[in-house]
């Protein structure tokens, strides 16, 4: 556990582990890795990575997003969003670019915002860091 906390501090990320439950909003400027449950609005100035055991009940505002888990709420992403094979979304999605795996489930409207290629030179990872 100490090694994980040390790595989190060193790399400047926030991690909600499997089994953890957060009541209330989260506002971070660093990447957020969620394997537990968040009840409340999520605001991130960087990547939000939602693992397959993770869930968010609330709106999500972030720079980038990768979803394997469940979100119930509006999703507004200023950059790239990826809805992977096990993603389950109830709510509207706005992002640019937007990647949706053929097995992802979405109950809501999808708005892929047009953005020039020059504005989007940063891609979101589809896997968490090896040490998580």
Image: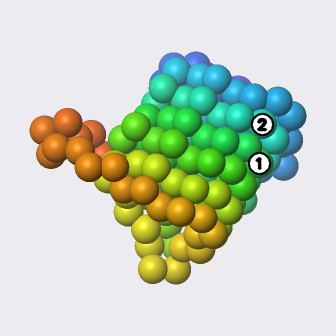
Q: Name the residue that disc number 2 marks.
A: 40
Tell me the residue at 30%/46% (across/down): 123
Tell me the residue at 38%/63% (across/down): 99
Nearest the camera: 125 or 43?
A: 43
Query: How far apart are labels 2 and 1 at the CA level?
Result: 6 Å
Residue 3 image-quadrant placement: top right
- Secondary structure under tag 1 reads strand
Tell me the residue at 68%/62% (across/down): 90
In the rendered image, the vertical position of residue 84 relative to residue 20, given as above or below: below
Give the image location of residue 29, x and y in percent.
52, 21
- Secondary structure under tag 2 reads loop
Marks 2 and 1 close (CB-CB < 8 Å): yes
Tell me the residue at 16%/44% (across/down): 116
Residue 89 image-quadrant placement: bottom right
In the rendered image, the vertical position of residue 129 relative to residue 85, given as above or below: above
Nearest the camera: 74 or 49?
A: 74
Q: Does any portion of residue 104 appear in the rendered image?
A: yes
Give the image location of residue 13, x and y in percent.
55, 28
Give the image location of residue 12, x and y in percent.
52, 22
Numbered label attached to residue 57? 1
């Amino acid at each position: 556990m100490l090694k994980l906390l040390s790595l989190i501090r060193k790399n400047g990320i926030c991690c909600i582990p499997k089994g953890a439950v957060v009541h209330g909003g989260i506002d971070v400027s660093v990447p957020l890795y969620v394997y537990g449950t968040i009840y409340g609005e999520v605001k991130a100035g960087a990547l939000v990575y939602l693992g397959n055991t993770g869930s968010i009940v609330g709106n999500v505002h972030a720079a980038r997003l990768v979803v394997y888990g469940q979100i119930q709420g509006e999703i507004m992403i200023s950059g790239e969003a990826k809805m992977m094979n096990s993603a389950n979304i109830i709510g509207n999605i706005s992002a640019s670019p937007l990647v949706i795996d053929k097995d992802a489930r979405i109950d809501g409207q999808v708005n892929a915002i047009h953005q020039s290629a020059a504005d989007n030179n940063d891609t979101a990872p589809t896997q968490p860091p090896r040490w998580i």
